[in-house]
Amino acid sequence: MTYFTHKGILFTTLGSSQKTLISVENDFQLLDDDVVTVTYPKSGTNWMLEILGLVLRGGDPSWVRSVPVWYRSPWIETDVGLKAALNYPPPRCLSSHLPFQLFPKSFLKSKTKVIYVMRNPKDVLISHYYFSKAFKGFKEPGTMEEFMETFLKGDVPYGSWFDHVRGWLEMKNKSNVFFFTYEELQHNPRGSVERLCQILGKDLNSQQIDSVLENASFQKMKDNNMSNFTLVPEGHFDHNIGKFMRKGISGDWKNHLTVAQNEYFDRVYQEKMQNVNVNLQWD
Ligand code: A3P
């Protein structure tokens, strides 16, 4: 698989192009009633999209069970996703992995709601490692040791985790950017769904919230062909090598990183995040 660099950030040639990236940054018009889920890859994007799809339909699972996630909430920076976004009747649900500096400029003049989901970068690393083995848009990761180095340097599609998170956290004072973490979804699912309902102005009763929680559970999503990526063609994803719905837990890094690798990761983290005045407490 080949990558190209756009404004210093790597992108895969599988489904992305410079033309689309330029267009999405400069021409794409975000609308006030758009909801955009933004993440660094492997941070729980599709989980949030499932929750969002259920909340928007009052807990009714028929939409998330009948429409593939990439049509429910197209990735605007991909060639196919941008076309889908342009043909999407508002109010739109959109997705993006773009770092802030490449996000549509129209955002700054809009009331578009951005839901930014973050995850412990050590778990992102592990999830990314396994995903990269199966997803043909990403390079074969090599050993965990090698991939950790690549990841920490940001030599992966969408660039450095640190830059991505720092860039979006700078938007924290904007009233239309909302932050969630994968860990918060794990530890306080009901509270997270209630907060999301509030953000979206959706008034769901207790049974409807139960339905959101049940249908967005790991097992239900694993069984949902519209969300588990089994519909992705073999040419893009080797289903014998990996599963998109892999483990769905927090702290899997502890099963993979050695003590020395963990300490090294912590050192890099401290150095890169030293000026971030947000209390991100990862396990
Ligand atoms: P793992 O590889 O650690 O299992 P993204 O959607 O950003 O690509 O993130 C994928 C990660 O989210 C995968 O992590 C996947 O298993 C996890 N995930 C997806 N749906 C989930 C759910 N309902 N509950 C918990 N984790 C989920």
Image (cartoon, rainbow, N blue to C red):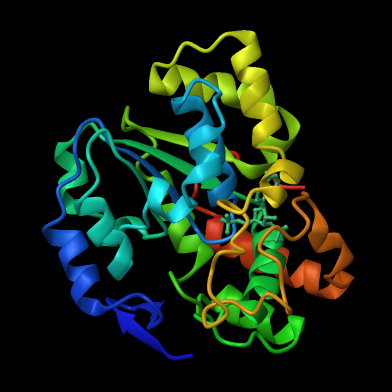
* Whether residue 197 is situated above or below residue 247 in the rendered picture: above
Q: Residue at x 33, y 78 (%)?
A: 8
Q: Is residue 278 visible?
A: no
Left or right of 220 in this view: 227: left
92 or 121, which lies in front? 92
Q: Is residue 229 visible?
A: yes
Q: Position of residue 91 (x, y in %)?
A: 26, 33
Quadrant for residue 152, please give it: bottom right
Left or right of 101 in this view: 277: right
- Find the residue positioned furthest to the left: 27
201 or 164, which lies in front? 201
Q: Position of residue 6 (x, y in %)?
A: 29, 78
Q: Residue at x 62, y 87 (%)?
A: 140
Quadrant for residue 134, please give it: bottom right
Q: Position of residue 225 (x, y in %)?
A: 61, 54
Q: Position of residue 249 (x, y in %)?
A: 78, 50
Left or right of 49 in this view: 211: right
Q: How many marks?
A: 0
Q: Residue at x 56, y 86 (%)?
A: 139
Q: Residue at x 73, y 79 (%)?
A: 241
* Whether residue 273 is situated above or below residue 219 in the rendered picture: below
